[in-house]
Image (cartoon, grey):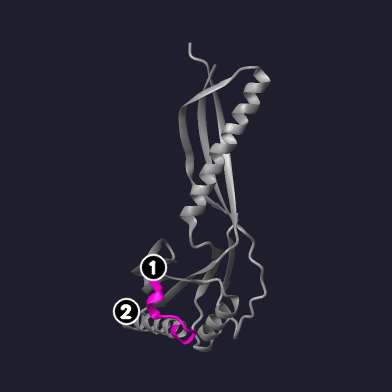
Amino acid sequence: MEKIIRVEGKGIVRRKPDVIRLSFHLKAENEKYEKALYVYNEDNRKLLEAVVASGMSREDMKTTNLRIGTRYEQEHDGKFYKNVFKGYEFTSKLFLEMPMNLEKLSVLLSEITERGTTPEFEITFGISDEEAALEEALKEAVLDARKKAKVLSEAMEVSVGHVKVITALDEDRILNPSRVEMPMAMKSMEMDVTPREVEMEQRVEVIYEIL
């Protein structure tokens, strides 16, 4: 029977954030379709105007998850509950990525509030080259597995041979992203924050032969 040793290695790479990612949530509803559409378009227009006014291009803002639907509420008629039509609803998410610059972020948020639009939003501080960091974390995971195999083999007074199988575990993981979530309810926003480092984690399982 072939003798093997199975170890798991973990690699974590830490990077200072160099990009800011903003996710805006737009929502408009009204009992009339035309009115709901008008409100949504106005909020979207004001948001794009704020982006341009803060020194960026409107093409930097990407729209996703646009949904147009009807809204119902349950009401009791004295005997039964029934769904009652309440109107139309427009929702979407808009994403914007910009270089790490808190002063410019503050300008953008001020431009948005000055236009009277109040979308909910989320700010995430991340790194631009996530793929390279994940690759480095994967290498660190392999080195960690090799180190553990050596420690175990020395304790058992055996020698480690060739690698039989190596498997990357789970999916790539980005740990400890700094996020800020809030409604757009202030006239201006002075960003006095220090985002923590972003951690990229990879795990591998390695099977070595024992000599």
Q: Secondary structure at mark 1?
A: strand
Type of amino acid under label 2: Tyr
Q: Nearer the viewer, mark 2 or mark 1?
A: 2
Residue 23 lies, in percent from the top left, at 48, 69
Near mark 2 (Cα within 10 A), the count class, few <14, some 14-19 or many ≥20, is some
Residue 9, above or below 183: above
Tell me: 204 left or right of 93: right
Q: Residue at x 63, y 76 (%)?
A: 191
Q: Residue at x 64, y 80 (%)?
A: 190
Tell me the CA gap for discs 2 and 1. 14 Å
Q: Which mark is residue 18?
A: none
Near mark 1 (Cα within 10 A), the count class, few <14, some 14-19 or many ≥20, is few
Mark 2 in CB contact with mark 1 (< 8 angstroms)? no
Residue 34 lies, in percent from the top left, at 31, 82
> Who is closer to the viewer here, 13 or 109?
13
Q: Residue at x 43, y 86 (%)?
A: 49
Q: Secondary structure at mark 2?
A: helix
Residue 66 lies, in percent from the top left, at 35, 69
Q: Which mark is residue 72?
A: 1
Label whose residue precedes the other's in the sequence (2 or 1): 2
Looking at the rendering, the stretch of residues picked out in magenta corresponds to 52-64
Quickly name the residue at label 2. 33
Q: Is residue 195 magenta?
A: no
